[in-house]
């Protein structure tokens, strides 16, 4: 049920597959959920300007049922660290939006949670 979208103005062609695997594992571990339900996508080479600059930047959206608010700060740190390490995008140029929809607003396998 966790779904993370990474949008960036960088190409990421070389490291996209490895980045997806590492982020998927990180989310499962940090959220205490089975990786069988984690989905991650990367949208690279987006037209993106941050702080008036087209320097490397990223916007992440994490949606998951029951996101624990007390863990969001450490999750933000872990995601920013991983992205900075894997892509070179400075953590100060990464925004993350967290959202936790109601269970009936999340569908899977022909039903909802």
Image (cartoon, rainbow, N blue to C red):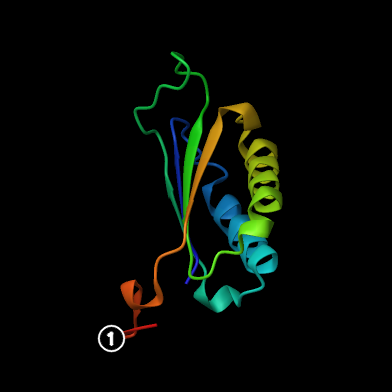
At horizontal 34% and vertical 85% (from top left) the residue drawn is 109
Give the residue at the far left of this rendering.
Answer: 110
Residue corresponding to mark 1:
110
For residue 90, say whether it is visible.
no
Disc 1 crowd rating (10 Å Cα; few below 14, some 14-19, many 20+) is: few
Is 67 located above or below residue 91 in the figure?
below
Count the marks: 1
- Which is more toward the observer, 34 or 107? 107
At horizontal 35% and vertical 73% (from top left) the residue drawn is 106
Q: Position of residue 40 (x, y in %)?
A: 48, 59
Q: Is residue 69 left or right of residue 81?
A: left
Is 89 located above or below residue 40 in the figure?
above
For residue 10, say whether it is visible.
yes
Quarter holding the C terminus is bottom left
Image quadrant where residue 86 sits: top right
At horizontal 32% and vertical 72% (from top left) the residue drawn is 105
Is 93 located above or below residue 39 in the figure?
above
Is 38 located above or below residue 41 in the figure?
below
Image quadrant where residue 92 sits: top right
Q: Secondary structure at mark 1?
A: loop
Q: Position of residue 20 (x, y in %)?
A: 55, 55
Q: Position of residue 15 (x, y in %)?
A: 57, 44
Q: Position of residue 82 (x, y in %)?
A: 68, 45
- Which is more toward the observer, 41 or 52? 52
């Amino acid at each position: 049920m966790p779904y993370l979208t990474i949008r960036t103005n960088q190409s990421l062609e070389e490291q996209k597959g490895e980045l997806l695997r590492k982020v998927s594992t990180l989310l499962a571990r940090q959220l205490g959920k089975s990786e069988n339900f984690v989905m991650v996508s990367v949208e690279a080479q987006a037209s993106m300007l941050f702080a008036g600059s087209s320097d490397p930047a990223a916007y992440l959206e994490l949606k998951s049922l029951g996101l624990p608010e007390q863990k969001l700060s450490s999750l933000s740190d872990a995601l920013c660290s991983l992205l900075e390490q894997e892509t070179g995008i400075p953590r100060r140029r990464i925004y993350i939006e967290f959202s936790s929809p109601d269970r009936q607003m999340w569908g899977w396998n022909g039903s909802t949670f």
